[in-house]
Amino acid sequence: MMVPMITKPFVCVLLALGASTALPAAAAPACVTINNGWVRLPPGPMPMTAGYARIRNDCRDEVVVVGAGSRAFEEVSLHQTTLVEGVSRMREITRLPVAAGTSVQLQPGGLHLMLMRPEVVLQEGAQLPLRLSLADGSKVDGTLQVRREPPPRP
């Protein structure tokens, strides 16, 4: 049986498309890390809590965090708490630059993760996944430990 010539290029295109969709998402640069991640254990069932960590950039260039997510929460976003005329205000951060060779600390009263609608029961000591999305399309994975109190400072 003879295959028409138009079919061969079409099959090649399909094979190329299939191969490209099988590739994993852009790998995380090994020079960006999430350290000392933790989640404050709420006093009871609550629809939200906060997460904290240190984001370290040992790359040669600045990286920009543009999103966050976790299988343990329905929604995760970056926020910053500021004091304006004696009133604490919180706003969402859509871009968090981390200069080369520096760290950004997510901590109570400042930059933090808003963790909305837990998908799991939060128990002290549990390790929860966290994934940060960078502006270049790469992802950085880390964990957040559920704690009643902040960890000791390193």
Image (cartoon, rainbow, N blue to C red):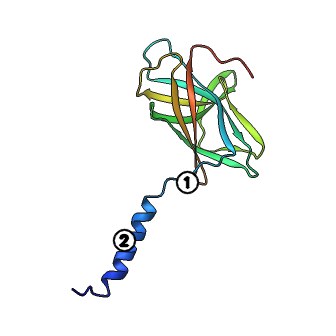
Q: Position of residue 3 (x, y in %)?
A: 26, 85
Is residue 11 shown left or right of residue 24? Answer: left
Residue 73 found in image quarter: top left
Distance CA(mark 1)–CA(mark 2)? 22 Å
- Image quarter of the C terminus: top right
Residue drawn where x is 61% and y is 54% of the image: 136
Q: Position of residue 118 (x, y in %)?
A: 43, 26
What element does badge 1 sit on? loop
- Image quarter of the N terminus: bottom left
Q: Nearer the viewer, residue 117 or 142?
A: 142
Q: Nearer the viewer, residue 18 or 117?
A: 18
Vertical order, 20 against 6 (above or below): above
Q: Nearer the viewer, residue 124 or 97?
A: 124
Residue 143 found in image quarter: top right
For residue 14, the mark is 2
Q: Position of residue 148 (x, y in %)?
A: 57, 13
Q: Nearer the viewer, residue 117 or 72?
A: 72
Vertical order, 30 against 79 (above or below): below
Vertical order, 45 against 82 (above or below): above
Vertical order, 4 against 88 (above or below): below
What's the residue type where badge 2 is placed? Leu
Residue drawn where x is 51% and y is 21% of the image: 126
What element does badge 2 sit on? helix
What residue is pinned by disc 1? 26
